């Protein structure tokens, strides 16, 4: 029973809109952590560090939300959502015109510096370079980065493989000029924050 409750809570917490996030003061958590360390109560210190990590992740997601553009062409951004699992972070922001259900989805898939996320992006760059001549796929360079655009049924998907690891994706209906929208992105600003520079 406890396992089922924990699983349900985990699933619910996977994709929380950032507008619902309430952050605890991280500095207060570190003050408590230091007190537990001084008292050699290391189990409690580790527990506090876990809470600090969760609060810093909330701040990170909020910062990502501000780094992503507020508009793409005539489409306005909704509040971003995030998911985290197995060392990977997915952050997505949807762009819509007033009253329309369809629009543009901009997402980032990655993780911390190095590790699986960097290898994942490197593999994607290699695959894009080698598979650029496949039907329905076009590989190209975008502001010094490897990118590819491919057909996904009624939609098109454009992937930008970031040098620091991770992938930015734009997805919209086929008639949308994804390349022009991708050119409008401040990729240096986005990548600088994501890579911690």
Image (cartoon, helix red, strand yellow):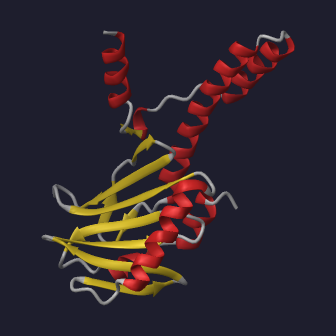
Front position in the image: 137 or 156: 137
Q: Is residue 160 above or below residue 28?
A: below
Front position in the image: 154 or 76: 154
Q: Quadrant of residue 47?
A: top right
Residue 139 lies, in percent from the top left, at 37, 85
**Is the N terminus in the top left, top right, bottom left or bottom right quadrant?**
top left
As drawn, is 45 to the left or to the right of 164?
right
Residue 55 lies, in percent from the top left, at 58, 32
**Is the C terminus in the top left, top right, bottom left or bottom right quadrant?**
bottom right
Q: Is residue 173 above or below residue 113?
A: below
Q: Residue at x 26, y 86 (%)?
A: 134
Q: Quadrant of residue 32?
A: top right
Q: Residue at x 47, y 60 (%)?
A: 68
User: How many numbered discs, if any?
Assistant: 0
Q: Residue at x 46, y 78 (%)?
A: 126
Q: Residue furthest left?
A: 154
Q: Residue at x 27, y 81 (%)?
A: 177
As drawn, is 151 to the left or to the right of 145?
left
Residue 115 lies, in percent from the top left, at 59, 55
Front position in the image: 123 or 17: 123
Front position in the image: 145 or 23: 145
Residue 124 lies, in percent from the top left, at 44, 71
């Amino acid at each position: 029973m406890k396992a089922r409750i924990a699983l349900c809570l985990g699933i619910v917490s996977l994709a929380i809109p950032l507008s619902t996030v309430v952050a605890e003061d991280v500095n207060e958590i570190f003050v408590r952590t230091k007190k537990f360390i001084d008292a050699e109560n290391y189990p409690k210190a580790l527990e506090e560090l876990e809470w600090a990590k969760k609060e810093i992740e909330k701040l990170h997601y909020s910062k990502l939300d501000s780094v992503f553009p507020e508009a793409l062409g005539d489409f306005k951004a909704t509040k971003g959502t995030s998911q985290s699992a197995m060392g990977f972070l997915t952050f997505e922001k949807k762009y819509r015109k007033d009253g329309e259900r369809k629009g543009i989805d901009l997402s980032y898939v990655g993780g911390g510096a190095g590790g699986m996320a960097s290898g994942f992006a490197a593999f994607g760059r290699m695959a894009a370079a080698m598979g650029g001549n496949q039907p329905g796929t076009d590989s190209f360079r975008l502001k010094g980065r490897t990118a590819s655009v491919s057909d996904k049924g009624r939609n098109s998907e454009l992937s930008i493989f970031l040098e620091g690891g991770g992938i930015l994706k734009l997805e919209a209906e086929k008639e949308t000029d994804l390349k022009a929208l991708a050119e409008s992105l401040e990729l240096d600003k986005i990548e600088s924050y994501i890579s911690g520079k």
